[in-house]
Image (cartoon, helix red, strand yellow):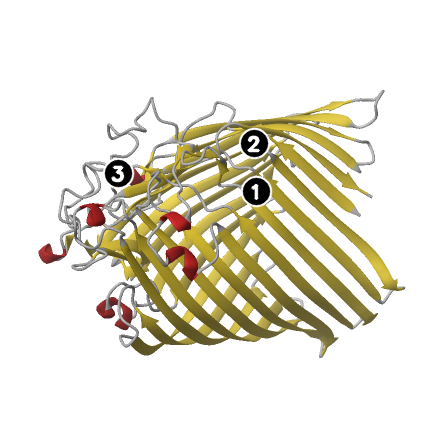
């Protein structure tokens, strides 16, 4: 039996527990685990002054393990999740770079200037955790009635069966799974106190999968695994969009004074299967060769009525993709404590259709698969009588038809659409290092360092938001979410408490992330500035390691930093911010 309770500022209370128990001695056992997360949220909704962006999640998992003999076992698992959390809050970060006047005026910027753009939430007057979120009822007539939700409602049910046999000198494993997800998401992507723009997105997805594999240690020098995989995925999708009474298009008289209510619906059925093999062969006592290959085949049936089009207008499409991917690797044990390796691998990410397309052209056209060729050279080592573990790696990756989520302009209302595009060719290379050092019996120091260079080799896009200008060379842009430098450093010092029993663990750690952009157009509002975060904790652990009590603090210097930012097709921009200073207590019990 084990349990954990976490209490923190802003009403955080998390309760987690699990219990293992036998049902039939030595043959049948069970495990039940439950998690309940409650959180008021760091945000204040400036519409009504209430806490916002809180969490309300209940999740449970039940497992039954049957082992009638030493050659067979069956594990049956059931998962349940009920998430009724608040809608995420966004901050209006619209700048003069946004707003192309599509809606008959000067666009969003003059009406709703964002934080940091001489608007009402301008630094230092503004607060990144104060933002507006109006209720669905305040939006266009018919919007709230479409779905009875004002937050994020998600229900998950899943059942999985894993069977294992020891036969034919090896092991057969069968993994069967079924998962059903029903979700309704209400989002306001502007962050104002008036109804500007909002969506309710409903997704109903069920997935069935089956994997069968056989693994064997064929000889002292050779082991392998071969297998088959099959999956069916059925998705139904609904989208309800309100361009509200305070939308610039409404204020500019492009449509009626109450706003514009738009709907879309569709479905996508996917059938995928694969066959794979992977093997390891020891060429000598210190050199091992790895070879593997996989054939993947995927077919999708797609049906969509794009946003705002009448019921008779539907895009019905079908497409399929297949590919062979493979990998090869060589490990070389330099000695008992050092291992060098070199690997080459190809990757394949299937193509698809855009369920949030805003035009028939976009809905009717599939995007291409993404492919990658990667190399990695590395060293794993335990040094100085195993007091220092040091791992080094260098990698090089070439992507073709890189898939990116984008929001792009269109030449008709509502003026923009979300879709996946193939961003030409990208080359990324970098180096990574991590270490764990034990300078004394009571002090542990850990750290990581990463450098990444990622560039477009071939990429055309629309930079100014005017679709009449077509596309242009965009290879000068930075690849989104690709910081050049990342690092972390942490230390834990143990103080034995002989009188009390057990000991204290005092930890301090920090992380650093370099500047990067959150969207492919590198808009000002999407800039994630470089940030260093400092965290610390002090924990008491009993001598039998059954009770741990911890006080912790995260982002101790209360740094303000973006976690995401998006320019909505040169119309407006919105962002989310990382958690401010957080502190709390955790109690962990194990019996």
Task: Choose between 494 and 385: the one closer to the eye.
Answer: 494
* Among the two numbered marks 3 and 1 on one chain, the one whose residue lies closer to the N terminus: 3
Q: Is the residue 24 above or below the residue 245 in the image?
A: below
- Earlier in the chain: of badge 2 and badge 3, it is 2
Dot label at residue 381:
1
Instruction: Where is residue 519? Give x, y as percent.
Output: 30, 46
Residue placed under numbered mark 3 in the picture: 94
Write down the residue under mark 2. 10
In this picture, residue 23 sits left or right of residue 222 = right
Q: CA distance from mark 3 to mark 1?
A: 49 Å
Residue drawn at x 28%, y 53% as measured from the top left: 407
Q: For mark 2, give the secondary structure.
A: loop
* Residue 353 image position (x, y, % from top left): 33, 68
Q: Position of residue 158 (x, y in %)?
A: 61, 65
- At x 80% / y 38%, what residue is drawn? 546
SS label for mark 1: strand
């Amino acid at each position: 039996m084990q349990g954990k309770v976490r209490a923190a500022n802003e009403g955080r209370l998390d309760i987690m527990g699990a219990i293992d128990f036998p049902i039939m001695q030595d043959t049948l056992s069970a495990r039940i685990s439950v998690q309940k997360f409650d959180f008021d949220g760091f945000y204040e909704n400036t519409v009504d002054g209430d806490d916002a962006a809180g969490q309300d999640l209940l999740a449970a998992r039940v497992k039954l393990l049957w082992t009638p003999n030493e050659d067979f076992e069956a594990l049956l698992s059931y998962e349940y999740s009920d998430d009724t959390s608040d809608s995420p809050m966004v901050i209006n970060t619209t700048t003069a770079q946004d707003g192309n006047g599509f809606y008959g005026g000067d666009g969003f910027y003059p009406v709703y200037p964002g934080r940091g753009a001489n608007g009402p939430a301008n630094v230092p007057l503004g607060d990144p955790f104060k933002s507006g979120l109006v209720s669905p009822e305040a939006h266009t007539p018919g919007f709230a009635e479409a779905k009875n939700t004002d937050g994020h409602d998600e229900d998950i049910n899943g059942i999985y069966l894993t069977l294992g046999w020891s036969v034919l000198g090896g092991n057969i494993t069968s993994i069967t799974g079924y998962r059903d997800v029903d979700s309704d998401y209400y989002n306001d992507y502007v962050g104002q106190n008036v109804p500007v723009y909002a969506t309710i997105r409903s997704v109903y997805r069920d997935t069935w999968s089956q994997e069968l594999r056989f693994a064997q240690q064929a000889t002292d020098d050779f082991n392998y695994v071969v297998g088959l995989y099959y999956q069916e995925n059925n998705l139904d999708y609904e989208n309800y969009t309100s361009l509200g009474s305070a939308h610039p298009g409404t204020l500019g008289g492009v449509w009626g004074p109450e706003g514009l209510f738009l709907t879309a619906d569709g479905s996508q059925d996917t059938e995928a299967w694969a066959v794979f093999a992977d093997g390891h062969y020891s060429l000598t006592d210190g050199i091992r060769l790895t070879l593997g290959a996989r054939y993947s085949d995927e077919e999708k049936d797609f049906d969509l009525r794009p946003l705002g089009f009448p019921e008779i207008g539907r895009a019905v499409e079908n497409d399929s993709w297949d590919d062979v991917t493979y990998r090869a690797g060589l490990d070389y044990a330099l000695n008992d404590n050092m291992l060098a390796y070199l690997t080459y691998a190809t990757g394949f990410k299937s193509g698809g259709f855009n369920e949030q397309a805003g035009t028939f052209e976009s809905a009717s056209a599939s995007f291409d698969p993404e492919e990658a060729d990667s190399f990695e050279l590395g060293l794993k080592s335990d040094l100085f009588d195993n007091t220092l573990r040091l791992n080094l790696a260098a990698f090089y990756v070439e992507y073709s038809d890189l898939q990116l989520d984008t929001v792009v302009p269109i030449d008709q209302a509502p003026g923009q659409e979300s879709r996946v595009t193939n961003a030409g060719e990208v080359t990324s290379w970098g180096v990574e290092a991590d270490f764990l050092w034990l300078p004394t019996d009571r002090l542990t120091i850990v750290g990581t360092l990463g450098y990444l260079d990622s560039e477009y080799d071939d990429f055309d896009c629309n930079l100014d938001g005017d679709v009449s200008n077509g596309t242009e060379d965009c290879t000068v842009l930075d690849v989104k979410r690709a910081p050049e430098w990342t690092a972390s450093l942490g230390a834990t010092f143990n103080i034995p408490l002989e009188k009390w029993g057990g000991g204290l663990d005092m930890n301090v750690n920090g992380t650093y992330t370099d500047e990067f952009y959150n969207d492919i157009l590198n808009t000002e509002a999407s800039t994630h500035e470089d940030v260093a975060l400092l965290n610390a904790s002090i924990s008491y652990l009993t001598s039998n390691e059954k009770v741990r009590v911890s006080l912790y603090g995260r982002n101790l210097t209360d740094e303000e930093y973006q976690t995401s930012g998006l320019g909505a097709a040169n119309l407006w921009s919105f962002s989310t911010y990382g958690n401010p200073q957080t502190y709390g207590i955790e109690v962990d019990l194990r019996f």
